[in-house]
Amino acid sequence: AQSVTQLGSHVSVSEGALVLLRCNYSSSVPPYLFWYVQYPNQGLQLLLKYTSAATLVKGINGFEAEFKKSETSFHLTKPSAHMSDAAEYFCAVSDPTENTGKLIFGQGTTLQVKP
Amino acid sequence: NAGVTQTPKFRILKIGQSMTLQCTQDMNHNYMYWYRQDPGMGLKLIYYSVGAGITDKGEVPNGYNVSRSTTEDFPLRLELAAPSQTSVYFCASSYGGMQPQHFGDGTRLSIL
């Protein structure tokens, strides 16, 4: 069975500082991996996805993530945080052999950006 | 483009009542999903559908039912509401298994 663990339910950074949100997965097959962002009272929006192409994936709003098979990780980074990045972030995994697109989500990480 | 539209946005139910959460998408997506989001738990899949007439259970299907008679609509039915079903419900859709899902803005449901 697949699972996702996001280390740290709350992360606080200063504006302009590096953002690092951690995601580790468990899967018996190389998975598809996604990062979604949720702003208050809204649905989830896709930030970026990994589907077995390049291991370094660039997404929207300056975010990127690197798939590291040896570490079973897919951490999300952004070089310089902006106030508008404050939101909840979810890492998710799906099994490409099923072709159902079912997502298993991590618990989420709330990013706080301090001025 | 409307994308994925969920109605209602908010609802309060009494224990034992029933209701249907509506979800419609205008992107001609074959795949649709229902999730529930509880604080600190992420999102859990309730039911999904890979096309009209085809539905299947997700991680937490108990207490819910779905139908998919058209490509556009994927309603979620609660037959006997219980306090444990208090949650935020999200509907999502996608073109296929490896494609990203597009989410609605959610329905906040409280059962008292």
Image (cartoon, coloured by chain):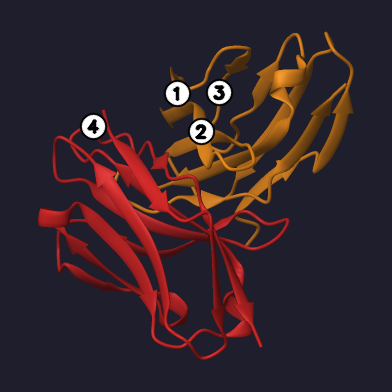
Chain colours: A red, B orange
Q: Which residue is mark 4?
A: A98
Which percent across, then down, holds residue B105?
A: 68, 51
On residue B44, the disc is 2
Q: Which residue is mark 1?
A: B59
The type of residue carrying mark 1 is Glu
Q: CA distance from mark 2 to mark 3?
A: 23 Å
Find residue A93 and report its image quarter.
Answer: top left
Report whether residue A53 is seen.
Answer: yes
The type of residue carrying mark 3 is Ser
The type of residue carrying mark 2 is Lys
> In this rendering, which labeled residue sits more in front, label 1 or label 3?
1
User: Are dots 2 and 4 in contact, CB under 8 Å?
Assistant: no
Q: Which residue is mark 3?
A: B69
Q: Who is closer to the viewer here, A112 or A98?
A: A112
How many marks overall? 4
Report whether residue A50 is seen.
Answer: no
